[in-house]
Image: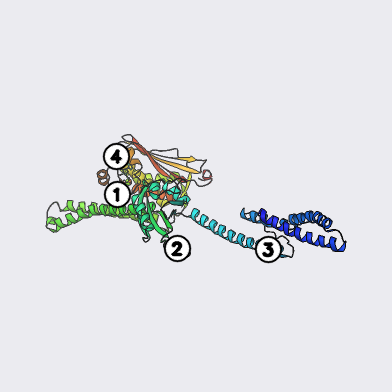
Amino acid sequence: MRLGSKWFFFLICLLVLFVLLQTLFLFVWKMSFGFSSFLALCFALPFAFLYVRFALLGRIRILTHRTRESAAGLFATQSQVFPDDEWGELSRAVSDLYGQLKKEMDKVSGENEYCRAILAGMAEGVLLLNERGRTLMANDTAQKLLGISEKIRDKTTLEIIRDVQLEQAVQDILGGGAAKTFELSLPAFSKGFEETVFEVNVAPISPSKGESAARRVNGAIVVFHDISRLKDLERIRKDFVANVSHELRTPLTSIKGYTETLLDGAWKEEVALQFIQVIERHTDRLIKIVEDLLTLSKIESQGFRLRMEDIGVLEWIDNALNEVRERAAKKNISLPVSGVSPSLHAKGDRDYLEQVLLNLLDNAIKYTEEAGKIEISAIEKKDSGEILFQVRDNGIGIPREDLSRIFERFYRVDKGRSKEMGGTGLGLSIVKHIVMAHGGRVWAESQPGKGSTFYFTLRQTPNSQYKT
Ligand SMILES: Nc1ncnc2c1ncn2[C@@H]1O[C@H](COP(=O)(O)OP(=O)(O)O)[C@@H](O)[C@H]1O
Ligand SMILES: [Mg+2]
């Protein structure tokens, strides 16, 4: 309250009291004019002061105090009791006003919280720019995806992301252009990819209804959708189709060539039998590729289920060895089994697990020279409830740079050699998928020229040591 108005109230009170008292003293108690004036002033002064101080200013102070409280966001919700006069009325009106104000403020801050929660929970990165293209805010995902810090306020996209295409798109939008979507590749900030590919959507923030029509945009919103994984899958699919086509085309071309030669009359000659044998070999190869592809697609299909059963590990290894024994004997390769307890049991699908061992043994025999040694062992890992299997050979080995890729489809260290041996390049990929479907892991270690060891794990059947 201003000083002037306080004095104004004081003077009014003083005047009224003075006139009343002087009238009383002059006409009722018949005092002299001077004495009655002096006495009236003596009484009126403290009364007027006390009235203004406590009765009037007190209420105004309460109002002032409550106004300040509400401005500081501390508005007390409990209603206060005011007298039934004009001041009370005014206080109630102010009180109601603040009640409304508080409701509105709660509503706005609630909506703000929603927006904040939505932005924080979004999988997409969001950047909000003002009408000059300067950053107002970036959500957590944007900061993570773009590798930017929180100190981005008031910076342009060019300063933050350093991409001319994006900056141009933002300027177009701020100049009144329509929303735009484009792809953007940036150095990767997330693990596993060399670069991050984004689908970026830049859209204008239109002025709200009340704002002047002269302003066409209030700013821009930039949404970053990370499509690196999708792109990667697309690349893998394209590579796969290209690889399959290539793998199928080679034997088909040979078959076609030899068939045409035979049809041209070669069937009458001595070489005919040789040609037919070549055709048969290529047909077998085609069948093997198609079979392997079907196995892979079956394991990867949605409804794929393993028929889990209890498998005696030693018996399972023996069965697989019986299948390859003859081929190993031809190369004079020994097949010792070590450290496998007869009581050891694993949980798995017998048919698929047999394929795992057969593929690993097949490779080991193929890539081991004459008189080599392929050793199989199975170690019980009591702490993790796993069995660790090893297929170790002393063959040609695998170069370090190829080791991480040999489980990929159609990946072969030496293409010619693999094909010569009837390989499809899909064996290890099948091994990996079967082991993973069983919840296990598979990996390899190798020293070129000295040999390779393939490892895989399977879950042990509980209490397998008690079974025979
Ligand atoms: N025991 C091994 N010793 C050396 N190289 C191996 C061995 N096992 C696999 N490889 C390499 O890994 C590649 C992929 O194996 P795989 O998927 O079984 O295909 P394939 O046997 O049909 O060639 C092989 O071409 C070979 O180069
Ligand atoms: Mg193989």
The residue that appears at 25% across and 52% down in the rendered structure is: 246
Q: Type of residue at label 4?
A: Lys
Q: Which residue is tagged 1? A: 424
Q: Which residue is tagged 4? A: 331
In terms of secondary structure, where does tag 2 sit? loop
Real-space CA distance between mark 2 and mark 3, rounded to the nearest whole angstrom:
36 Å
Real-space CA distance between mark 2 and mark 4, rounded to the nearest whole angstrom:
89 Å
Q: Quadrant of residue 25?
A: bottom right
Q: Type of residue at label 3?
A: Leu
Residue 355 appears in view: no
Q: Residue furthest right?
A: 29
Between circles 3 and 4, the one closer to the viewer is 3
Q: Type of residue at label 2?
A: Ser
Q: Which residue is tagged 3? A: 90
**Where does residue 286 sit, x and y in percent of width and height?**
27, 54
Mark 3 or mark 4, which has the lower sequence index?
Answer: 3
